[in-house]
Image (tube, coloured by chain):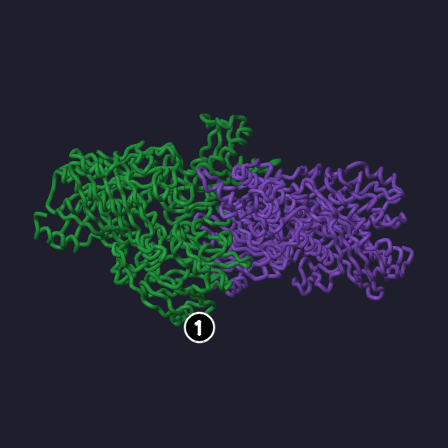
Chain colours: A green, B purple
Amino acid sequence: MAVATPFSVIGKRIPRVDAGEKVTGMGQYVADVRLPGMLVGRIVRTPYAHARIVRIDTSRARRVPGVRAVLTADDTAKKRWGAWIADQYALAYQKVRYVGEEVAAVAALTEEAAEEALSLIEVEYEELPAVFDPVEAMQPGAPVLHDEYPNNVALTIDVERGDVEAAFAASDVVVEETFQSALQWPAPIETIGSISEPHPDGRLTIYMNTQTPFMARPRIATALGVRETDIRIIQTFVGGGFGGKSQDDNNAIVSGLLALKTGKPVRIINSREEDFMAGPRPRVPMKIRVKIGLKADGTLMGKQLYTVADNGAYCAKASAVTGVAALRHDTTYKWQNVKSQAFLVYTNKAPTGAFRGFGNPSASWAVEQALDIAAEQLGLDPLELMRKNACEPGYLSPHGNRVTSCELRQCIDRTAELFGWEEKRRNRRPYRGIGATASSHVSGKRHFGDWDGSVAMVKVDEAGQVTVLSGEGEIGQAATTVLSQIAAETLGVPLEDVKISRADTDVGLFAQGAYASRLTYVAGNAVARAAANARDQLLALAADLLEARAGDLEIKDERIFVRGAPESKSTTVAEVARKTLFRRNGTAVIGKGEFDSDTESHDPKLRYGNESGAYNFSCHAVEVEVDPDTGQVKVLDYVTVSDCGTVINPIGAEGQVEGALAQGVGYTFSEGFLIDEGRLLSPNFGDYKIPTVADMPPLRHEFAESYEPTGPFGAKGLGELGMDPVAPAIANAIFDACGVRIHELPITAEKVWRALQEKKAHPGE
Amino acid sequence: MAVATPFSVIGKRIPRVDAGEKVTGMGQYVADVRLPGMLVGRIVRTPYAHARIVRIDTSRARRVPGVRAVLTADDTAKKRWGAWIADQYALAYQKVRYVGEEVAAVAALTEEAAEEALSLIEVEYEELPAVFDPVEAMQPGAPVLHDEYPNNVALTIDVERGDVEAAFAASDVVVEETFQSALQWPAPIETIGSISEPHPDGRLTIYMNTQTPFMARPRIATALGVRETDIRIIQTFVGGGFGGKSQDDNNAIVSGLLALKTGKPVRIINSREEDFMAGPRPRVPMKIRVKIGLKADGTLMGKQLYTVADNGAYCAKASAVTGVAALRHDTTYKWQNVKSQAFLVYTNKAPTGAFRGFGNPSASWAVEQALDIAAEQLGLDPLELMRKNACEPGYLSPHGNRVTSCELRQCIDRTAELFGWEEKRRNRRPYRGIGATASSHVSGKRHFGDWDGSVAMVKVDEAGQVTVLSGEGEIGQAATTVLSQIAAETLGVPLEDVKISRADTDVGLFAQGAYASRLTYVAGNAVARAAANARDQLLALAADLLEARAGDLEIKDERIFVRGAPESKSTTVAEVARKTLFRRNGTAVIGKGEFDSDTESHDPKLRYGNESGAYNFSCHAVEVEVDPDTGQVKVLDYVTVSDCGTVINPIGAEGQVEGALAQGVGYTFSEGFLIDEGRLLSPNFGDYKIPTVADMPPLRHEFAESYEPTGPFGAKGLGELGMDPVAPAIANAIFDACGVRIHELPITAEKVWRALQEKKAHPGE
């Protein structure tokens, strides 16, 4: 559905600004960066899930020709770091807590020397009892990972709004079920890597593929025991992040240690195996008991969640992920009475963390299926149930989320229309079924300190070049394209005149980086303000030149003229920028813009307050066919309609929806490893099955007509939305097709087949 | 002489901020930069001084394995470029005009392939009559270099203020002599080089060792026939410039052509021979007829100059150099009646151009000797003559230069004292003599467009790090150290908390770069204003935190406290910067500062107006001993006192004085090549004799107590001042020692010996 816009650059199908660099191979990813005298860094990882380090002998490794440093925890500051809970060392100190944890590190002239040295480091361990299941880990007597957390619980959430017991008592139907979500690896194509370059003044420049350079800086400084100002981070091209590169790993910290020790640049690029073991952290798996009550007419009465989340051995963003799972889904539908208890529990597995959707896919997996069950029990059309309870503009969620724009009903209606929901419901066929879900997501979140902002500057130089200075960076999601479009539109210049800086903590401007679907909305607002500020500076002088009032001027296609009189006397952006500078007491045209969302930081106990400046919404509908003989599920049709406000760049937005759906499909059907006593079996893409093109269902999708009044040109976030409710939509369709309800991800053919056998054996249940 | 200052960072002996990078070899000069897929570029240079290009056959060169491009003028835009006069092609078109001019270029995978291809390019020339002497070149019938200039005169200056003829008529003594100054190569240790990196969007990033990245950008764009915004220039570490790297050469233009042609990064690093032939342009040699008239008491009455300047084959900054030679010396002494005629003339030699001191050393060579001759004729102490006529604060020169601070008399008096002028004058010994000179120089000059400004921003980030964003760059003169000190002093933080950006035309701020001794004064003022703006932002919030008025607060050693109550409640810069950002609607502390000197652009005819915001002054005194048997001159003592306002960094300032003196000594005694029909014989450091440590005279120097009210912390320029009057001081001392007057630089032993023989033969003359 093409939407006519009054814009010149916004809403246009514009190829990403870094496309050329990428397709020609000129863009420098971290593995492409070469510095003079650079050493190869490698890491020794433990094969034990839980063990005491008795002794490390590095003497043989040190004697390997070409080896320049061999480090263990004794060579480090032994300072613990973490996003919120500081519990992880740069190199394991005294204990190891998961298979793959960093124990020692080597820097050498060549890969071969580093490899040989690794093999000669002798580590003596005393194995300790380990625990892998978070429910078991909460029990008294379970092995304890961190002394500060004797019951292994890193975080507890316990909130109630309204009165859920009364709500259930007043309900006509109450559904209570338990669902288990899965470990899913972000699996970006580019593994995590870094190059740390030491400077004579003691500073380190770290080239790395982080999503969040400015957030990484204090964490790395803490772990290295240096001042934050001693670290400069330069973001290289990033080959995908999906949350997994929002800096919850030791890679750059270890390259930093080796660089400081050797006085040489040190490069550590994770192998694929290392990336799976201890790289981008996998999604936090959760066991969720959900109880919901509804009136006969489908009105939602109350909801209760009891969540046990698997943190793995160290805590990074899993605490925030758990918070989202516990509370955010209440912004999709109009709930009044909700209670949520959640526990984030340490286990002897790889640390889990941020991944596209945060806690939303886990919560959706449980709640959207419970709603489907309730609809079935009440004999209601599930889409009708969704529609009836859908969030609307002005909605205040039980946890304080204030919704401004919301086109969820439009999404539901348009999904039904595109999908042919009514017709498909009427024409039921055996082993074919349809399911639907909805979701909401944020556009940034007040997470770190009391600020969810962004700073940008827009410079219009003496040659008319527009440069956007932003520290937000680019991780492959085309954020820099969107920000460039916003600057171009605001200034009335073509996109090709706009260049955008790379994220660099020294010369860049503070930015929290890529997470929480925040860049279009938060950074976009900052860039729009900076560009507007630059435009005002230009128009002030243009008014003199054109003998007009600044307020009467308009910029279009680089020309500045009196509004409504495009044929009259005019000037150009470049000319005005030049004249602003080249005159007595000339000034440079540099606009500054800041934006901070109108949100509240959550008190960790109370957990009340508007978490984001804007919410985005989507509806998904899916048709499946189940092979009763094999349990194989085939997705026949998939429709989704998203409300992300104004679509800044349709190509990019479509890519976000399709990419999110691909990860949703992988999450639903295939992603995960066999894990034996905390050990990943076959950590490679042969065994870890992300969907290929052949695995992708036919997909049709659209964007709702929507305008977010607080967003830049009406835009809000999008990137994570599409991921959230894929699995439950498919699960609901499977139930519709064959009457079996899958409670545990992923939905393998074997699970469906076994459920079908079970159903045949006990048809009444 | 240690001057007590109220400053914490200003005036301190602080090592340069890039010292560590330099002494450890980590700083990347252009030859250290490695880009993936980078090709080697090489240039074919003509062996003819003046010839028509009949035919170029590149077919054999193109077939050399590994060769990726061979270019001639036919592959270029054939657009001429130049600093003011556009007369030079990227590759010679139709004609060559000096030995060493670029005729063709090659890019290849290896040095060897490039070298072989060079040797296989066949160029057929038709030799043309050439002219090497500018006076001959002005004569009717002389060979013409450029059709637009049939008499070879690129520039004519002809101004008279007051009435020189009347002044001469009223004078008691009139001196008229002709002096010839010399070709001197800037000879930075690092040769000129560039790497041009093409981007898929058609842009070029050029890494280069220019002094003036933002000024190079339009020139390179013109020559390449692309838009200015298609060029990004990043300044690498620069191994000395001295004016010679203020971008008057084809190196980066040719690497740019080859990069655009091949689609690969191309690197061209001049060999030493190429650098001498066609790299940093040598000083403009001038033949100056000077006529001065004085009253018996030494009062200056009038001065007339007739100057013929040798431009070489193409015009870059030689026109401005000639202007300085013609007019600027009139700011040293109080002249009332002056007339100056000057001609800048094309010859078939390497183009001349900017070099430390611009036209001042040439003018000083003539005028300061004429003054010495007049003093001798009047029986006056030459130092007394200087003192009597020395410029004073408030002086308005005949050409409109307005002097604010001026401690020239203090410089003269203190030089006399340090040197023991009186005593040395009293105790004359045969073949020993003393001489003295004075000079004045600018602190920036309104040269390009109507702006002699600088833009800076100072960011105080959330960790308390101060980053100075400036596009001025660093060429080895410690400008970045001075600017960092100014920011640190203004903000009250230690220097180690301040980092400064590299010059980069994309993310940097417009800056004219390093020339005209402008950085301390012009850029320093911009940085001081930007830092003050950032400080105001900090103090506004600090006032809230400390419940005080912003105006009552002081910052010292990073602490912010109520002035006069250092023990009271306080906060820190880092804390306030953090709190300014991390709060609702937080803002980043980013100060912006612009400074434009209170100067006027010169009308090319009228040439009237104040050219600089501040003038610096110096006095030099020298004692020599002449060996009558060999003519060898030995400098026994050298004293100079400089007025550069507040000395921001004594280490750096001393380095400037000593370095300038070294180049002055080379200029005086040894620098120059034998040139045969426009061909440099032996262009290498074996034959081009810059002074070694052994050649340096004993030097004592000081800085006057001085404060420039318009300068940052009272500072003004310094870098060129010390170079200007070295040669005439030595020449005057030689005359004092043995009665011979040398009119032509350099002062070789042979010239002195011959003059002594001549004097013996004709003792009366």
Q: How many marks?
A: 1
Place of residue A47 in the rendered image (x, y in percent of width and height, measured from the top left): 32, 66
Q: Which residue type carries mark 1?
A: Ser
Place of residue A357 in the rendered image (x, y in percent of width and height, measured from the top left): 31, 46
Name the residue at 20% across, 46% down.
A730
Place of residue B156 in the rendered image (x, y in percent of width and height, measured from the top left): 71, 42
Q: Kindly tell me whether residue B128 is visible in this rendering.
A: no
Q: Secondary structure at mark 1?
A: helix
- Label 1: few (<14), some (14–19) or many (≥20) C-alpha neighbours in 10 Å: few
Q: Is residue A722 above or below residue A562?
A: below
In this rendering, position of residue B734 left or right of residue A645: right
Q: Kindly tell me whether residue B555 is visible in this rendering.
A: yes
Task: Give the residue at mark 1.
Answer: A59
For the N terminus of chain A, which image quadrant?
Answer: top left
Front-most of B615 and B669? B615
The residue at the far front in this view is A140
Q: Is residue B252 above or below residue A466?
A: below
In this rendering, position of residue B409 left or right of residue B586: right
Q: Is residue B647 above or below residue A421?
A: below
In this rendering, position of residue B336 left or right of residue B88: right
Q: Chain of mark 1?
A: A
Front-most of A185 and B492? B492
The residue at the far right in this view is B764
Name the residue at 50% across, 38% down.
A591
Place of residue A180 in the rendered image (x, y in percent of width and height, measured from the top left): 23, 51
